[in-house]
Image (cartoon, grey):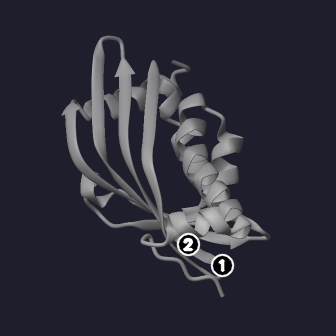
Amino acid sequence: MKLLSTVTAAAIAATSPAFANDAAQINAAIIGIAAGADRHDWDRVRDAFADEVMLDYTSLWGGESATAAADDVIAQWSGFLPGFDVTHHMVTNETITSIDGDQATAQADFTATHRIGDELWVLGGRYDYTLTNVGGTWKVSALTMTALWETGSRDLVGQAAERASAGN
C-alpha cells in the first residue's frame, strides 16, 4: 500500500519512479480536464474522468453536489462551453496531497476566464480532486470547486448556452 503526504512528496518523487509515474498521470488528468474543455477536446476530458464523477460547484451555484456519468458531464459541458468566444481554465500549483492504494487526492489553484465579445467573467479559486486508479491509469472521480473570487457577470454562462444551442 502506497501512502503519501504532501510533506514528503518531493523527496519521494526524487527517489521513486513509481511515484513519479503516478504524479505524471495525476497531473495529466487534472490538466486534461481544463485544457480539453478549453479546446473542446471532449475525448481528452472524458479520458481524465472515471466512469462516474462527483461534481461539487456549490460554492459558486449553491445547491447540492451530484454524481453523474462522465459521459453526461461531457454532454453538459459541450452544450454550453462552445457558446463562449473563448475560455481559458488555467490550473496551477497542482499538489498531490495523498496516494493510498488506488485512491489519491490532489489540489490545484485555478483562474477561469470566459469571454463573449468584450464581456468577461473571470473566476478564481481552488479545485480539490479525488482520483481512482482504473486499470493502471489515474482518473478523476470527484471534483470540488471552491470559488474564492470573481469579476464580471455569471450571466455569460446562460448567454453561452443559448449561443451553443443556436450553433454559436
Q: In this view, does 119 lie above or below 48?
A: above
Q: Looking at this rendering, what residue extends furthest in the right direction? A: 135
Residue 138 appears left or right of 108? right
Per the model, the C-alpha gap separating discs 1 and 2 is: 7 Å
Residue 152 appears left or right of 55? left
Residue 1 picture location, percent across and down: 66, 88
Disc 2 residue type?
Answer: Ala
The answer to which image quadrant residue 59 occupies is bottom left
Q: Which residue is drawn at 73% across and 65% down?
A: 17
Q: Which of 40 and 4 is in front in this view?
A: 4
Residue 155 picture location, percent across and down: 26, 32
Residue 106 visible in the picture: yes
Disc 1 residue type?
Answer: Asp
Q: Which residue is drawn at 66% across and 78% down?
A: 102
Residue 157 picture location, percent across and down: 35, 34
Q: Residue at x 44, y 66 (%)?
A: 66
SS category of the residue bearing label 2: strand
The answer to which image quadrant residue 103 occupies is bottom right
Q: Which of 92 and 80 is in front in this view?
A: 92
The answer to which image quadrant residue 131 occupies is bottom right
What is the number of callouts on the image?
2
Residue 56 appears left or right of 42? left
Q: Looking at this rendering, what residue extends furthest in the bottom direction? A: 1
Q: Which of 3 and 10 is in front in this view?
A: 10
Label pair 1/2, CB-CB below 8 angstroms:
no
Residue 130 visible in the picture: no
Mark 1 neighbour density, 10 Å: few (under 14) some (14–19) many (20 or more): some
Q: Which residue is drawn at 63% across and 71% down?
A: 132
Checking the image for residue 102, the label placed there is 1
Q: In this view, does 74 lie above or below 154?
A: below
Checking the image for residue 104, the label placed there is 2
SS category of the residue bearing label 1: loop
